[in-house]
């Protein structure tokens, strides 16, 4: 017996949306075999009907209601981005009991709890694999494959733009501004790169991963965030000499019943798997109690990798629709305490511009000791006006280190606290 075709309506047909349409058309036979019924492209809502597109769409509309209120649409795909009107449109579809697939990290990280609750109430699915790490499967492995394990920590390189910039700075000795300019020319960075280089993009993804890994409600505003704009070629040279690479890391962990989530540049040993992630690639490193260490690696963005994740979610949603499954969206509404960033315990790299005179090291060491921050190793670089002290601490509280830095800035012999970065992933 021939099964009724299932219809997918799209909100948006830009870089990702066009990739979704292409995959649904080009892989129609494989998708039909996996779902058990044909899956066809229905209405596609766009802002400008007259814009030329590189995929053929039979039913273009500039009215999103033609998608979210259409009785013939079985699954709505949202690839518009942003909070509004995406939130209202997704809510409209879910309220009708229509399942939704989204790639919208900002929306899921900010208002996910509200949308998942609505989906559960109306018996619909809300799938979002593409919201984190593009084509890399990480949501389902955390939500399903590792459901019987206890995830202890997640570390990720979740932004291809910043990883490309840091790769060029590390391998070619480029300054931050030059590497950013090259990334913009190649299309890896937006004209306004703030969301990437200041860590907002990675923070939203980190919140989503933390929510799943630790079965808790975590939103983007819970994530301590620092970007890469202050990373210098000097930092990278020092890191390399000590056996480290510098990466923008997203880190989520559960410590004594509190959820700690942060995004910041960090030194990581060159032997660690994340250190070898180059260019615009992404990777997520999961530390499980039973499974041990796992790494997921691949293209974190781009039309076809992200579209692949979206279409995978479409298959999940349409297959469940055919089977008549009562969906479980696998997201907890439990609000666990969020760890204060001041209570994070980690090692630190500190670079000081100092006066080249006797007693400087003693004064610096005394200041660290006053705040119970132990120095693991120290090097002196340069002489005269170029004298610097490079220190690596033992693990210490963020709050204690910040208090130390404040006092160091008040020392007559310290001209500047030139750089501070956290050190992750163990010894080099």
Image: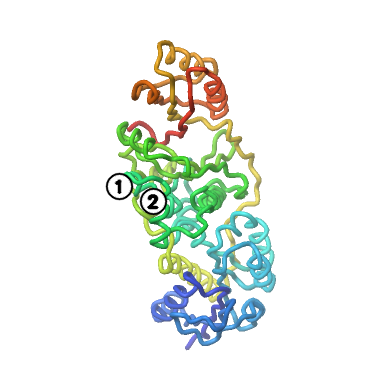
Mark 1–mark 2 contact, CB under 8 Å? yes
Is residue 350 depicted above or below 278 in this figure? above
Tag 2 residue: 179
Q: Quadrant of the rendered structure where residue 155 is?
A: top left
Quadrant position of the C terminus in the picture: top left
Along the line of sight, the residue nearer the viewer: 129 or 415 = 415
Q: Is mark 1 on a helix, strand or loop?
A: helix
Q: Disc number at residue 35?
A: none
Residue density around tag 1, few if under 14, some if 14–19, many if 20 or more, within 10 Å:
few
Q: What element carries label 2?
A: helix
Tag 1 residue: 172
Is residue 135 depicted above or below 292 in this figure? below
Furthest residue in direction front, as rendered: 385
Residue 332's x, y, as percent? 62, 52
Residue 422 seen in render:
yes
Residue 137 left/right relative to 86: left
Residue 182's x, y, as percent? 38, 56
Is residue 205 depicted above or below 345 in this figure? below
């Amino acid at each position: 017996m021939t099964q009724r075709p299932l219809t997918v309506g799209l909100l948006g047909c830009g870089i990702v949306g066009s990739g979704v349409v292409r995959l649904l058309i080009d892989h129609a036979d494989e998708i039909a075999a996996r779902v058990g019924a044909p899956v066809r492209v229905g209405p596609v809502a766009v802002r400008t009907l007259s814009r030329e597109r590189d995929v053929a769409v039979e039913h273009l509309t500039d009215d999103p209601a033609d998608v979210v209120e259409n009785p013939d649409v079985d699954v709505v795909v949202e690839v518009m981005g942003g909070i509004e009107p995406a939130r209202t449109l997704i809510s409209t579809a879910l309220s009708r009991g229509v399942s939704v697939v989204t790639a919208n990290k900002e929306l899921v990280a900010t208002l996910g709890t509200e949308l998942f609750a609505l989906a559960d109430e109306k018996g619909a699915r809300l799938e979002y694999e593409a919201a984190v790490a593009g084509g890399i499967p990480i949501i389902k492995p955390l939500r399903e494959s590792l459901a019987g394990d206890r995830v202890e920590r997640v570390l990720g390189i979740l932004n291809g733009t910043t990883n490309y910039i840091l790769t060029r700075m590390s391998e070619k000795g480029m300054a931050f501004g030059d590497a950013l300019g090259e990334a913009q020319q190649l299309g890896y960075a937006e004209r306004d790169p703030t969301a990437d280089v200041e860590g907002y993009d990675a923070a939203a993804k980190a919140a989503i991963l933390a929510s799943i890994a630790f079965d808790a409600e975590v939103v983007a505003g819970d994530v301590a965030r620092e970007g890469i704009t202050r990373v210098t070629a000097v930092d990278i040279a020092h890191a390399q000499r000590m056996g480290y690479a510098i990466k923008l890391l997203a880190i989520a962990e559960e410590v004594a019943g509190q959820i700690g989530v942060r995004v910041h540049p960090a030194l990581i040993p060159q032997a660690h798997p994340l250190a070898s992630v180059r260019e615009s690639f992404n990777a997520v490193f999961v530390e499980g109690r039973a499974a041990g260490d796992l790494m997921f690696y691949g293209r974190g963005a781009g039309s076809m990798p992200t579209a692949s994740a979206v279409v995978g979610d479409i298959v999940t949603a349409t297959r469940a629709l055919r089977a008549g499954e009562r969906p479980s969206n696998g997201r907890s509404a439990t609000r666990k305490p969020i760890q204060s960033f001041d209570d994070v315990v980690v090692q630190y790299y500190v670079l000081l511009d100092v006066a080249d005179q006797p007693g400087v090291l003693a004064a610096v060491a005394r200041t660290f000791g006053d705040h119970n921050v132990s120095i693991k190793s120290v090097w002196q670089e340069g002489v005269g006006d170029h004298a610097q002290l490079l220190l690596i601490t033992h693990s210490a509280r963020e709050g204690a280190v910040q208090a130390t830095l404040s006092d160091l800035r008040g020392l007559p012999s310290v001209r500047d606290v030139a750089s501070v970065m956290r050190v992750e992933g163990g010894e080099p």
